[in-house]
Amino acid sequence: MKRFFLHALFVAGLLTASVCTRVAHAENSALLMVMAPPETAFAVAWRGKSLLLALDAPETAYVTAVAKGSGKNALEGKFHPVEGGWVMALSPPSGRRMAVERTGQGWILSMADDVSQPPPVKPVTWRLENANARKGLVLMAEGGSFGGIVKVEDPLTGAPLQLVTSREAGLGSAQSRRMPEMEIASSLLGLAILPLRDGLVLHSGEDGVEITLGEIGGLHSGALSAIALPKQGIFEWAGLRVQDRKTYLLDRRKMMDAVMAFPPAERRAAHIDLVRFELAHGHAQEALGILRLMAQQDKDVDKDGVWIALRGVARVLAGDSDGADFDLGIPVLAHHPEILPWRGMAAALRGHFPEAQAFFNETTGGMETLPRRLWQKMVLARLESAVKAGEKQQAETLIAEMQADTNAPAGLWAGAEFFKGVLLNQAGSDLKALEIWRRLGHDHDPYWRTRAGLAKIRLELGKKTISQEDAAEQLLRLSMGWRGDDLEMEILGLRVDLLEGLGDYRSALESGRDLLRAKSAEPRRGMLLDRMRQLFLHAFENTPDTVPGALNSYALFKDFGSYFPEGDDGRNILINLAKRLARLDLLAEAVAMERDLLKTAKDAGDRADIGARMAEMLLLDRKADLALEILDETHGSGLSADMEKTRRMLRAEALMQEKRFPEAQKLLEKDSSPEAMALSGSIAFKAQEWEKAAGIFGKLAGEPPVPAVEADEVRRNLVLRQAVALFLAKNEAGLETLRIGWGRIMRESSDASLFALLTTPRVSPGEASVQDLVERLGDVRFFQEFLKKQSATQD
């Protein structure tokens, strides 16, 4: 019953592929059930001791494990997004047999003790076509239906690894192969390809996988025949055969053969046909790659209006609105009826909806012959422009037409429903809008499901019917279901704002990092980095100056240091954090931070200041030798008198710790300030120059107050130290004078009994010693506490 309930949640789209999974290995066997949408393809391959699992799409998926036995060898894994899908790495015990099978709910990976490794049920057939020395090899992997390609980092080499997913259980490569251009690793399911040379390109489809060398496609042998296509208008969409994935690879190979059938100087027309073909299938990046190749091989192609128009369309579909404007805005194209709707779509991409609406309204043709995929994108862009430009009547007409089309794809209907909700929201019918968006939250189309979820959260936040915490959690789920474009950035951006408002800076920085990793973030990277630095600054400014606060700040610095603010803001954070760490006795970490600051010191004064702080921390850590080194390293001229004095005091203290007492005393002999005298007294005490130490402490303590009043803690402490020094100097007269002058005052202090013991006359005056002092104090443990206190006072 529980299993059925989890599956029902998964089907409803409520669970995501980022859910942490627990793979529990029983003593003899284990199961890992990967629950994913029915169309999701899967790949499983060994790389060293790691078992890589890959899903081919960022669709919602729930990953769970069913254990047999005790599960004492439990492992934890987590799917995380990568280019092309999701991946998880496991480390199963060695000597186990792994098997993969497909179920109605997804995939099952099982493990048993049998060490024999059976080959895949449907082993891949490899076919190497004739090589051309100038262009490279073409390798075909055939024998079943393959899915998308997931790109990961190889656990063994750290190089890029491409995992080709399979839609059929048992379709894999039992034997590893190595060729000059690639390594084909053994796989339980799908293919694992490790490129060994740049330029390796994989194309996967229902009828196999094509592996080529070269920027586009590589070379093919055999009969080459051109495909005749009509030559009408700019784009000539009507002559293209655009069906499904089953025919894509076959048609593409034929068109590439057509390109190679012509001499290089005569390939332009065939290349343009190939670009149209890729665009008709929605493959913008592939089309742009071919267009770049054409520009390299044909110096005059940039004067071809059709080539420029196709590049403009490819840039629109790739989300590059600025590049599209550059191409489609040239005079010869700007007002052409086939170009106007694409200019409208480019304006909609920029968010300039009135401008987009003007282009769409000017359009009198050019949309009728669009391939189905492109027509759907264009119609939805036109609808969004009408809605956001305030053209309510036109938007309602478009929605009615789209929903009346019984042959309309599901994505088109979902888009119409979404914008119907937007219109209702604009009209003040919030409850009806929410009802539509909630319904779309269970739609099969991931894009409109995600947009509806975001719109619902924004509306509920505005109406204050959802807390910021709940909204942030729902946005996290949305971000896991959609990746790779401005919609993901909008989701993550809103989540960052909410988390910052809640004071959850760690989660905000994590979402901000995901935001920077989004594919569409590159054009705005500078702005996003500034946002991360501002967030980092706010995190430190608003963290309380407590032990947990300091530790949290340090953890943020270690985890998100690459987004550290630049300039004075960043420097001030480092300085304050180093001080807080030093107070927590994390001295090595504090010194490391100051060392980083030293690399960017502004001038000699700044270097000297940093060096002084580092030396102070090193002295606290009892590393006097390193303190002296850093003081030498940061020495400079033109320092202020205060800085010179601070550094001189630090050097003297370091020399004292090194027991270089004469050098330390010489540094302070001309300084009569109380700070220098106190340090001189400590040096004399450490050097066992008892009379000198007593004299300095007495001079600092001054004469006893008359009439007798309670002296402050500093003076009482100096008097006590003077008494210890006089005792060790066997100066009975000095102790008597001290007792007479300070006895009444010291009786009011916490050290009254100790002062009395030290100043009480001995029966037989003579050589004073530490042992004598122990006997006078009576209890060795009490004496140890006394020495510890004295040492702390001197430091």
Image (tube, helix red, strand yellow):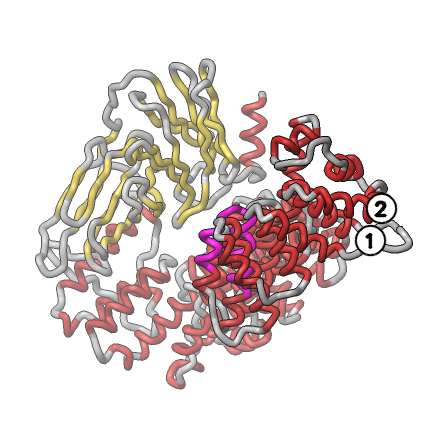
Which is more toward the observer, 228 or 373? 373
Res. 289 mark: none
What's the residue at 25%, 53% (across, down)?
201
The percent position of residue 28, horizontal first and vertical second, equals: 38, 14
Q: Give the magenta part as a residue range.
A: 609-630
The residue type indicated by label 1 comes to: Pro
The percent position of residue 66, horizontal first and vertical second, equals: 47, 22
**Residue wearing tag 2:** 745
Which is more toward the observer, 680 or 689? 689
Asked if the stretch drawn in magenta spans residue 675, the answer is: no
Element type where label 1 sits in the image: loop
Which is more toward the observer, 161 or 99? 161
Asked if the stretch drawn in magenta spans residue 615, the answer is: yes
The percent position of residue 576, horizontal first and vertical second, equals: 61, 57
Quadrant in which the N terminus appears: top right
Q: Is residue 698 above or below residue 608?
A: above
The percent position of residue 65, horizontal first and vertical second, equals: 47, 25
**Residue wearing tag 1:** 704
What's the residue at 33%, 69% (across, down)?
236
**The image quarter in which residue 175 lies:** top left
Q: Is residue 323 above or below residue 535?
A: below
Is there CB contact under 8 Å for labels 1 and 2?
Answer: yes
> In this rendering, does residue 408 appear at all?
no
Which is more toward the observer, 757 or 412? 757
